[in-house]
Amino acid sequence: MKNVLVFFSVLLLGFSLPVLGLEGKVDGKEIPAINYALDTVWVILAAVLVFFMQAGFAMVESGFTRSKNAVNIMMKNMMDLSIGTISFWAIGFAIMFGNGSGLFGFSGFFVDASKVDSYASLGWSSVPVMAAFIFQAVFAATAATIVSGAVAERIKFSSYMMISALITIIVYPVSGHWGWGGGWLSELGFTDFAGSTIVHAVGGFASLAAVIVLGARTGKFSRDGKSRPIPGHNIPLATLGVFILWMGWYGFNPGSTMGADAGAIGHIAVTTTLSAASASLAAFFITYLLYKRADVGMTLNGALAGLVGITAGCADTTPAGALIIGIICGLVVVFSVIFFDRIKIDDPVGAISVHGVCGVVGTILLGFFHSSNGVFYAEGNAGWSFLLVQIIGVAAVVFWAFCSTFILIKLINSIMGVRVSEEDELNGLDYSEHGASAYPDFSKSSFGSTF
């Protein structure tokens, strides 16, 4: 016990030393050493929780797709984190948070601790540059990995790695600069506390662009245009993934305080939980009314929809407001999945609906439910003005994410192609791309139709 106390004392002392230098400040004013230490430890812990969300994404995507593509899903998620971290360190972080114009930053490339003055937009947080970077890097990987599920089962692995790198180098950082890096949306008053739009809608509408270029999986739609169900091979794995993601969201949302503010962290954790729970129930009840069965896939995506929807306003809504936002997102995600299926947009995991549509809905709903500035709370026309800003911000980010990704993927397609051959798709990407099987002791055909 004594050794443990000595270790933590040394750790706190180590964190406190930089207070005498450039860091350990909030808006240029030094803070007590213990506050600096606790802020830093909290942000690193939150980053670890968000990092573990990568495992949740891998499990959800793998569980909702066929067994012959499970290895490919795991590899894509691994590359999202590996490529994304390096790309964001070298270029993305500077574009997002570096000093620059209202459109993008252009200082502080190849992040290191000596470049603290290059990131004035982070001056509101006391944590060291390197701690801020690692927290934001796992956010960038999250934006990229959303695309992985939407394009599952038919994209070339090499092309996907290019797409993942470009999202973390340019697509996500530019919109992130607009809203969080001192860009034009933040100047306008746009509010997106932890990234319903800046992270999730970016990933969702980048996914939509990718799916449009790729086309549907072979056999997904019949010749007369009717949708055919392609069931996932492991719903227990997908369920575990959703629980991991829900747990990771306690780093994603409360961690976005970028400081150990006890009151704010507790409030955010409650609003996050209430929204996820109410959205899950809403999705369950509406699918039961529609199909007379308790649909596990829709219920799982309902929980994720509530988490995405509350991310923008988790710090600024009341618990009751969070509950209502969750219910709305839980209903919206069901009808969104049905809509995209009917217009022949093949999204195996519902990523476009969960992250794209519900990210947009949650951010706009904050215009109504913000406890100070929302339509239901502000006096006079102030609430409507705030709602208008939210709509402008959402429209700008969605337009950028979709158009930039569409252009980049079309460019990649013209150079190296993005879709695997029909033969490779039918055999499964695990074999054609990786020469491996996730379940080598079982026959591939035992896991359902392979079309």
Image (tube, grey):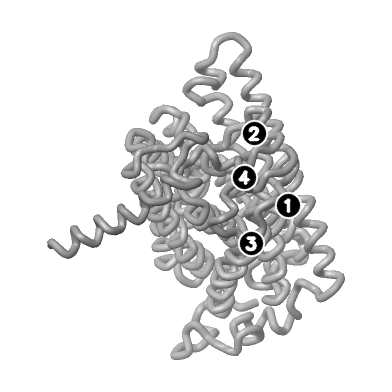
As measured in the structure, the alpha-carbon distance from the residue carrying label 4 to the one carrying label 1 is: 26 Å
Q: Residues within 10 Å of mark 1 (few under 14, many from 20)?
A: few
As measured in the structure, the alpha-carbon distance from the residue carrying label 3 to the one carrying label 2 is: 25 Å
Q: Secondary structure at mark 1?
A: loop
Question: Residue 317 is drawn in which quadrant?
Answer: top left
Residue position for label 2 = 186
Residue 89 screen position, x and y as percent: 61, 61
Question: Residue 415 is drawn in which quadrant?
Answer: bottom right
13 or 37: nearer the eye?
A: 13
Residue 108 screen position, x and y as percent: 65, 54
3 or 2: mark nearer the eye: 3
Q: Secondary structure at mark 2?
A: helix
Q: Is residue 323 above or below residue 399?
A: above
Q: Residue furthest left?
A: 1
Question: Residue 398 is drawn in which quadrant?
Answer: top right
Residue 441 screen position, x and y as percent: 44, 90
Upstream in the sequence, badge 4 or badge 2? 2
4 or 1: mark nearer the eye: 4
Identify the residue shown where x is 55% and y is 10%.
Answer: 379
Identify the residue shown where x is 44% and y is 44%.
Answer: 24
Q: Residue furthest top?
A: 380
**Quadrant of the drawing holding the C terminus:** bottom right
Residue position for label 4 = 198
Residue position for label 3 = 110
Amino acid carrying label 1: it is: Ile
4 or 2: mark nearer the eye: 2
As measured in the structure, the alpha-carbon distance from the residue carrying label 4 to the one carrying label 2 is: 12 Å
Q: Residues within 10 Å of mark 3 (few under 14, many from 20)?
A: some
Q: Is residue 304 left or right of residue 385?
A: left
Identify the residue shown where x is 42% and y is 45%.
Answer: 20
